Amino acid sequence: MTHPSSLSRRRFLHASAAGLAAGVLQRTTAARATTPTGSGRPNIVLILADDLGYGEIGAYGQDIIRTPRLDRMAEEGIRFTDYYTAAPICAPSRCSLLTGTHQGHATIRHNSFNEGLEQESFSADDVTIAELLSDAGYATALYGKWGFGPDDRYFAHPGDEGDPSHPLQRGFDEFTGFIYHHHATNGYWADYWWEGNERVDIPENANGARGRYTPDDYVGRALDFMRVNAEADQPFFLMLSSQLPHTPNHVPDFSEYDDLPMANDTKKHAAMVTLLDTHVGMVLDQLAELGVADNTLVLFTSDNGPHNETTVYGGTDPIPGPNIFSAGDDIYFNANGPFRGVKQNLYEGGIRVPMIAWGPGLLAPEQQGAVSAHQWAGYDILATIADVAGVSAGAGDGISVKPLLTGGQQQAHEYLYWERFKAGAPTPQYYLNDRGRHGKFVQAVRKGKWKCLRWAPGVARDGSIDITIGGTNPQLVVPVARVPKDAWEVELFDLERDPGETVNRAPANLSLVQELTAHMDHAHQPPAATR
């Protein structure tokens, strides 16, 4: 449980944030209703896939991988065509989702562990979805991948102040799964995981054995959590954070794809997506069996676009490792749909992902089975969930989409914003998919049908721009806003005419480029010093 002193401080920070937000953050969410009392408050389930591409679900155009439950969920709920993750890589995306801040304001903006550095952590001032709902009387739980490791950040004893990046310190009453990103990635048959703040061995998987497939196990924990709280008439917030279908392609059984002419490792990827689909179906079935489906909102999405990290070999399992031929699964299944790019970059394929909202008793009747082109992003999820729960979201960059879900008048963003720092060691697929700009600070804005991206000449780890012009001048470290306008490389795309981002329209639309890059200047604030 959260330490009382940190809880009080968090409430103070949350209460005071709304009044101070105008000079700090770009937006403040609208005032919310008073938190309802009693058992009528809706339950909320957030299911987050890992590296699931826009095109990997039947409802989004996939014609090889079988996803019957997600397809049915889309038929009964709302399928969003223009929903975006908040960042194209794991930790920053999850940080923005949990805290409701876009990457120009978020605490965590980098997958530091990709470079052998300690992962950046939440600050004590961050407020997560789970903290808001826990303070409002919800039971809260996270099962699966956390991703803000390493393990040794776990606080030693219940009641300790602990590290601000631990699930139990961020509003979750229960946690079973993986703290460290790479532990989750390679943890399909992990020999240990975390239960609360305790490391627990999994003897069935000791010494390389494969006795317990962990995703099946923590989905079972999630079902138990829903059952216990539904039977107690206790409103709950469940975050089911699966590592499926992140590489490596590990799955207990892929025999349902034996009839397809593809390598076994590629069949395994398909089976992983289908297993994820099965898990979603188990959650929806459990809600119906418990009699709480009509009072539950379920959101399903992905943390970023599809990976291109699986090298296909002839053996029984793929070996994760960058190489020019390593995007076999993505190419075979057209995982990014009609879009260009994949995980790691800010082209559409890296950030536009599936989003399905389902709630038989909460969605407006006319919205059940609807397809929406409303433009929103991962940093809107906190505001949306808070609104559904009747809780104040405080200050942030998000806008609740509850009005859209319930048939009301929906407020739109003036624009959506992203940024990305350098992402890991240079590898061919980053060069191929980011058009030769690996390691450069990049920003992107979408406003209506227009999408603008710009790359700085270089990037320093403190978030300032590292400029070396012509290879002769000494390096000048300057803030983003002071990078000379002619030093940026800019692209502009009309997504209505060119969803694949193939034709750069910047030269013919200089005034529009100026407008959109001004939004980038405004949205970006230098990050805190590396923690």
Image (cartoon, rainbow, N blue to C red):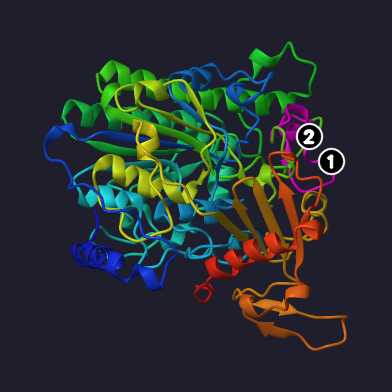
Badge 1 density bin: few <14, some 14–19, many ≥20, Cα 10 Å: few
**Which residue range is magenta in the image?**
315-335
Query: Mark 1 falls on what kind of element?
Result: loop
Q: Residue at x 22, y 67 (%)?
A: 12
Q: Residue at x 80, y 52 (%)?
A: 504
Left or right, 377 with respect to 350, comes to left
- Residue type at numbered disc 1: Phe
Q: Is residue 331 magenta?
A: yes
Q: CA distance from mark 1 to mark 2?
A: 7 Å
**What residue would you read off at disc 1?**
325
Which mark identifies residue 328? 2
Magenta stretch, main secondary structure, is loop
- Residue type at numbered disc 2: Gly
Looking at this view, name the residue that lies furthest to the bottom. 474
Looking at this view, name the residue that lies furthest to the left. 38
Q: Residue at x 77, y 53 (%)?
A: 434
The quadrant where residue 240 appears: top left
Residue 172 placed where, x, y %? 31, 48
Residue 171 appears in the rendering: no
Left or right, 92 with respect to 360, comes to right
Residue placed most toward the observer, 118 or 417: 417
Residue 209 placed where, x, y %? 57, 33
Residue 61 placed where, x, y %? 65, 24
Residue placed most toward the observer, 396 or 435: 396
Residue 66 appears in the rendering: yes
Q: Does 90 appear above or below 159?
A: above
